[in-house]
Image (tube, helix red, strand yellow):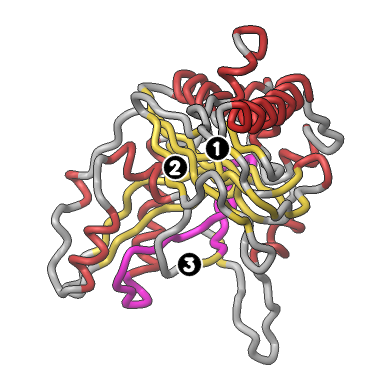
Amino acid sequence: MHLGIERGKKGHSVMGPSIWKSIFPRTRHVEFQIVADMHGHVIHLFERECSIQRRHQKIIEETPSPIMTPELRERMGAAAVAVAKASGYVNAGTVEFLVDQEGKFYFLEVNTRLQVEHPITEMITGLDIVRIQLEVASGNPLPLIQENVRSRGHAIECRIYAEDAEKGFYPSPGKIIYMQEPSGPGIRNDCGIYSGFQVPVEYDPILSKLIVHAEDRNQAIMRMTQALEDYVILGVKTPVPFLIDVLKSEAFARGDTFTDFIDTHFADWKPNRSDADAACAAFIIDELTRVRTARADGGQERVDSSPWQVLGPWGR
C-alpha cells in the first residue's frame, strides 16, 4: 500500500484525492467499510466499488468490486483495519483507496462517518451498520469478529439527483409534480421526497438512493435497470435515463469501471426522449382532464391516475 501525503507541513506535498486521480487517470475508486469499538477491535465489512463519478462525486456504487480477488481483498482489508488501529479510531467509517490496473492500491482518505452508499454493504452482509454504530458509541464491543462476516450476492446503488445529465449534471431545482417509486423483491429506495416536494437550490440535489440486491452481478444489473425504468419523477430533471444507459453499456457489463468512465464512454450523452416526453405530455393531459372533470361534476374530483396508466401499453 502506498500512502498519499495529506499533511501540509513544510517540506511535504499536499496530495488530496483529486490530485491522486490526476496522477493515476486509469484507476478505480475502491473503499472498505470498517467498524471499530472502544475495546481495540476493528473489522471490515468488505469493499465497495465507487469508480463511476461525476465531478469526483460517486453516482453508482456496487459490491463486490468487479476486479476483486480473495488475495487483493485480504490485503486491502488488512490495510484498512491497520489504518483504523494505528489512529485509535472508534466508529463506523470508510477507508478509501485508488487501485491501478496492476492491482496496486493507494491510500486516499478516511471518511469518519457512514457513507451514502453504506446500504449496499448492509444488503450483502445482512448487518445493520447504523445499529452497530450506535452500539459502539454506547461502549459495547463489536457483536461479531472478522471471521464471522459473510458476503452474499451482489448489490448496486444508484444516486438519484435533481440534475440534468445532458447539461453536465447541472442542478435542476423545482417542484416534483408527480412521483412513483419502484418496488419489489431485492429493491430498497431510501427516499426523502414526494409528489409536491419543492427541491431547493441551497442544498446538495440528491433526492434518493436506489439500491438493489441479487444473487450475482448480472442479475443485480438487470434488477437495477428495471427499477430505474419503473422510477417516475416529473417536474425536475434527474439522471435516471443516464443511469439506465450506463447500466446497459458493454463497458459496465464488462466491469471496466474506472474513474474516467463517464468522460470516456458518455461525454456526449443524449437521452432518448420518447418515454420521458410521452410521460410528461400524458401527465399534463391527465391534469387538464381532471380539472375539466372536476368542473363538470360541480367540484367533485375523480381519483388521480398515474402518467403511465394514462399512456397505456404503448408508453412502456
Residue 72 bears which disc, if any?
Answer: 2
- Which residues fall within the magenta stretch? 85-108
Circle 2: residue type: Leu
- Res 58 visible: yes
Task: Give me the disc on residue 179.
Answer: 1
Kind of residue at disc 3: Val
Q: Residue, x 61% and y 11% (percent of image)?
A: 312
Q: Along the horizontal axis of the image, is 267 left or right of 98? A: right
- Is residue 116 covered in magenta? no
Query: How far across and down, in percent of the image, does residue 133 sit?
Result: 26, 64
* In the depicted structure, whether residue 17 falls above or below residue 272: below
> Helix, strand, or loop for circle 2?
helix
Q: Earlier in the sequence, mark 1 or mark 3?
A: 3
Q: Residue at x 60, y 8 (%)?
A: 313
Specify which label sits upstream in the sequence, 2 or 3: 2
Q: Is-magenta flag for residue 92?
A: yes
Under tag 1, what secondary structure?
Answer: strand
The numbered mark, 1 or 2, whose residue comes first in the sequence reads 2
Q: Which mark is residue 110?
A: 3
Separation of marks 2 and 3 at Cα, in angstroms: 19 Å
Crowding around mark 1 (Cα neighbors within 10 Å: few <14, some 14 to 19, many 20+) is some
| Horizontal relation, residue 93 to residue 103: left or right | left
> Compared to 163, does 89 lie above or below?
below
Do labels 1 and 2 touch, CB within 8 Å? no
Q: Quadrant of the C terminus?
A: top right
Give residue 61's position: percent from left, percent from top: 52, 42
Q: Badge 3 local density, few (<14 within 10 Å), some, or many (20+)?
A: some
Q: Amino acid at mark 1?
A: Met
- Residue 268: x %, y % from top left: 86, 35
